[in-house]
Image (cartoon, rainbow, N blue to C red):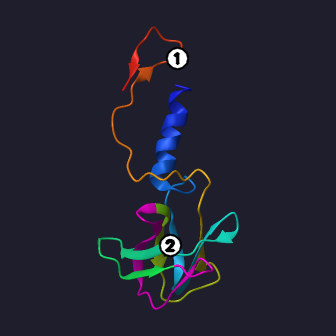
Amino acid sequence: MLRLFPLLLFAVQSAFGCEVRSLELRKVSPDLTVVVTHHGKPIPEIKVQVVPKKSIEPVFTAITDGHGTVHIQGLIEGQYYLTASHEDFEAGKEWIEVVAVPDAKTQRRLDFQWADWSYETSRVAGTLTGLIPGNTGNKTN
């Protein structure tokens, strides 16, 4: 199992490209700033998209500027998925809810940190085969 864990972690990291965590609903302002960085340095030319929860068509698409920033204005109330990607490699994904009346807890900025372990792979496929350590040769599947 100990040999299997790094491979599974690699697969998860490859699939997501940034920090591994579950999506939680974040309340945001209709006017939102998205910043993509790596080790504190901005990353230009990252595609940012906003897609309504029950849709596949984005309502907003833009590319980060030289400061790794995109400004989104005038989103209507509702729930969306916000993604940052480069050539189909996802830097991050957030589940957001745009609120009509922002308060002190409403976020006006989202930061995506491109991780060092973001291996450039857009698909992991195949069968994982190996031996269970300490066992008599049973295979993992």
- Name above or below for residue 106 compared with residue 128: below
Q: Are marks 2 and 1 in contact (CB under 8 Å)?
A: no
Q: CA distance from mark 2 to mark 1?
A: 42 Å
Q: Amino acid at mark 2?
A: Ile
Q: Residues within 10 Å of mark 2 (few under 14, many from 20)?
A: many
- Using the image as rendered, state which of residue 10 and residue 19 is in the foreground: 10
Residue under pointer 2: 46
Q: Is residue 67 magenta?
A: yes
- Looking at the rendering, which quadrant does residue 116 occupy? bottom right
- Across and down, in percent, residue 5 comes to 53, 33
- Across and down, in percent, residue 55 comes to 29, 72
- Using the image as rendered, state which of residue 97 and residue 39 is in the foreground: 39
Q: Amino acid at mark 1?
A: Pro
- Across and down, in percent, residue 64 comes to 53, 79
The disc, 2 or 1, on the residue closer to the chain's N-terminal end is 2
Residue under pointer 1: 133
First to last magenta residue range: 64-89
- Using the image as rendered, state which of residue 111 and residue 29 is in the foreground: 111
Q: Residue at x 53, y 12 (%)?
A: 134
User: In the rendered view, does 3 fall on the left or right side of 77?
Assistant: right
